[in-house]
Amino acid sequence: TFAITSGIIKYNDKYLIGKRSKSKKFAPNKWEFISGFIDTSESAEEIILREIYEETKLKGDIIKSAEPYIVEDEEARWIIIPYLIEANTDKFVINKKDHSELKWADVDELDNYKELIKDVEYLKSSKLII
């Protein structure tokens, strides 16, 4: 079981998703919301803001959070703490170590990414994605 924090980054009614680099240990080449392991003495809020900056060079403000939720896949059981973050711009920089692609997607487009289905269902029900 792993605990992670997830940034639901929003700018002008679009959400940032990233395709993980093929060299990543977990979920290579799969789409995700920007996330980070909770494995330091930082708070979950500090971790997600740091991870977002490291992976995209975006800065933003945490608008709200939701209760943690659990996703199980072939690799592990994931306890996810999600945060809605309002980005201050839509201009990102891809850190190729983390992602091969980043893109802004509207709420309807998110349904097209099968690896995001469980996350999107929960995030819609918790009103982090509307």
Image (tube, rainbow, N blue to C red):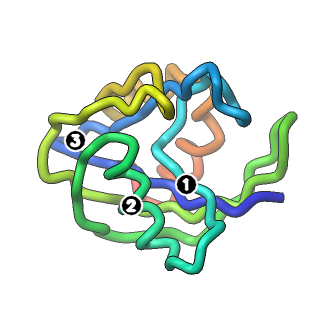
* SS for dot 2: helix
Q: Up-down: is 113 above or below 107?
A: above
Residue 76: horizontal and vertical position, in percent? Answer: 84, 46
* Residue drawn at the location 24% of the way across and 48% of the way down: 58
Q: Of marks 2 and 1, which one's residue comes earlier in the chain?
A: 1
Identify the element where label 1 is drawn.
strand
Determine crowd level at label 3: few under 14, some 14-19, many 20+ residues with C-alpha closer than 10 A. few
Image quadrant in which you'd find residue 102: top left
Dot placed on the residue nearer the N-terminal end, 3 or 1: 3
Residue that appears at 24% across and 66% down: 61
Looking at the rendered image, the disc whose residue lies closer to the viewer, 3 or 1, is 1
Q: Label 1, on which residue?
A: 36
Q: CA distance from mark 2 to mark 1?
A: 9 Å
Kind of residue sitting beneath label 1: Gly
The label on residue 85 is: none
Q: Which amino acid type corresponds to the residue marked 2 in the rendered image?
A: Arg
**Identity, as a three-letter code, of the amino acid under mark 3:** Asp
Give me the disc on residue 13. 3
Residue located 45% across and 31% down the image? 18
Residue 64 versus residue 104 in the image, above or below: below
Residue in the image at 43% along x and 54% along y: 51
Classify residue 92 as left or right of residue 122: left
- Cα–Cα span, label 3 and label 1: 23 Å
Is 9 in front, or is 128? 9
